[in-house]
Image: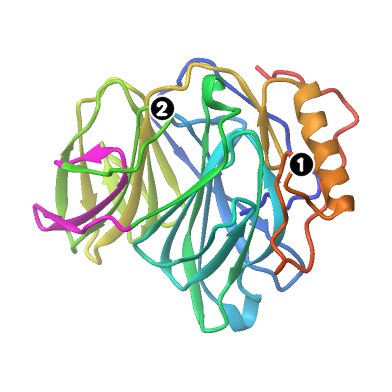
């Protein structure tokens, strides 16, 4: 998914982790007045990263007939991985590695941008309701220029204490994803029954985020509702999820603190103003030339009718924000 804000904020990530907090989302429209709106909890000024997780959009359930669904033409990424996770509906993905895949509920699509990639995302004609999450992972500096790639994985469903889990990245509750990652992290979908409780052993050195999709969930005395994100700093070896009477579905995301400062602007992650400005200029040049195999972002798929232009850089220099 692209960040389609006309004036995207520069985000510099790093610093000490604050106390436990509840992060409320802000609404971001993905286009015109009838476009689909997402609820964004990362990045925020008060909370930029959870481990390597650096971008968190939650959307739906939305009737495609009313919103037009997801319609994001070809656009670039650098220095990150995109994690697509659906609860309902279907999305068609194309990218400049040649990958052409469908994103379906309960299936992981992981795209590694590395040194540069471009992709498009459109909800399929048969999709009536669209509901899911789009997540980004920041690549550590040692791997930021890795070759672009695409992976698909269907995690098995596990039953744990009356709840169901699908671990799509990392390991949790005895389940492990075979998909390799560039930093220690975890990502899982958890469904709890009405008034259900689920104790979980977690990695003490990780920070964690719990994004509520449906229902209400209480963790350590704090209640989170749909679209809200509960952040837990490192130092815990366990947590307990408690669902309300209607049950709940959450995404549990965590990872070892990245330990690096990164600049994130539009769809790019880099280390400096010059690097980000260079990525923007290269994307604009490659759009004008139609996208070729020799470019940073690769050869554009023949199915693409259009690509997204990059927004204008802010007038001020992109500098670290404390």
Image marks 1 and 2: residues in contact by CB distance under 8 Å: no
| Callout 2 secondary element | loop
Residues at marks 1 and 2, CA–CA distance in whole angstroms: 27 Å
As drawn, 262 above or below 149: above
Which residue is identified by label 1? 295
- The count of marks equals 2
- The residue lying toward the viewer, choosing from 162 and 302, is 302
Residue at position x 43%, y 63% in the image: 86
Q: Is residue 129 visible to us here?
A: yes
Q: Quadrant of residue 302?
A: bottom right
Residue at position x 57%, y 36% in the image: 147
Quick one: which residue is furthest to the left in this view? 161
**Image location (x, y in percent) of residue 79:** 61, 33
As drawn, 299 above or below 55: below
User: Between disc 1 and disc 2, whose residue precedes?
Assistant: 2
- The residue lying toward the viewer, choosing from 76 and 55, is 76
Work out which quarter of the rendered image holds the C terminus and state it: top right
Camera-side mark, 1 or 2: 1
Q: Is residue 111 visible to us here?
A: no
**Image location (x, y in percent) of residue 168:** 32, 49
Work out which quarter of the rendered image holds the N terminus and state it: bottom right
As drawn, 255 above or below 171: above
**Image location (x, y in percent) of residue 64:** 58, 78
Q: Residues within 10 Å of mark 1 (few under 14, many from 20)?
A: some
Q: Quadrant of residue 120?
A: bottom right
Q: Which residues are magenta?
A: 154-174
**Image location (x, y in percent) of residue 16:** 48, 15
| Callout 1 secondary element | loop
Residue 163 in the magenta stretch? The answer is yes
Quick one: which residue is furthest to the front in this view? 294
Which residue is identified by label 2? 183
Residue 110 in the magenta stretch? The answer is no
């Amino acid at each position: 998914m692209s960040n389609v804000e006309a004036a995207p904020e520069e985000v510099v990530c790093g610093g000490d982790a604050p106390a436990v907090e509840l992060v409320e989302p802000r609404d971001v429209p993905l286009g015109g007045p009838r476009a689909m709106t997402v609820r964004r909890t990362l990045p925020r000024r008060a909370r930029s990263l959870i481990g390597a997780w650096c971008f968190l959009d939650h959307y739906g359930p939305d009737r495609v007939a009313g919103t037009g669904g997801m319609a994001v033409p070809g656009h670039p990424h650098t220095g990150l991985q995109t994690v697509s996770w659906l609860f309902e509906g279907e999305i068609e993905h194309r990218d400049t590695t040649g990958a052409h895949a469908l994103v379906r509920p309960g299936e992981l699509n992981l795209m590694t941008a590395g040194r540069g990639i471009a992709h498009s995302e459109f909800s399929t004609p048969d999709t009536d309701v669209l509901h899911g999450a789009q997540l980004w992972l920041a690549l550590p500096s040692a791997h930021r220029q890795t070759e672009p790639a695409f992976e698909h994985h269907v995690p098995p469903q596990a039953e744990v204490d009356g709840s169901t889990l699908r671990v799509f990245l990392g390991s949790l509750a005895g389940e492990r994803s075979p998909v390799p990652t560039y930093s220690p992290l975890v990502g899982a979908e958890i469904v709890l029954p009405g008034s259900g409780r689920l104790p979980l052993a977690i990695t003490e050195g990780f920070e964690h985020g719990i994004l509520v999709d449906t229902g209400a969930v209480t963790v350590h005395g704090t209640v989170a509702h749909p679209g809200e994100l509960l952040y837990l700093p490192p130092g815990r070896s366990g947590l307990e999820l408690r669902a309300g009477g209607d049950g709940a579905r959450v995404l549990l995301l965590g990872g070892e603190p990245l330990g690096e400062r990164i600049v994130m602007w539009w769809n790019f992650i880099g280390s400096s103003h010059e690097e980000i400005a260079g990525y923007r200029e290269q994307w604009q040049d490659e759009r004008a030339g139609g996208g070729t195999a020799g470019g940073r972002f690769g050869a554009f798929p023949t199915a693409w009718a259009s690509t997204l232009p990059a927004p204008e850089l802010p007038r001020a220099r992109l500098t670290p924000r404390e």
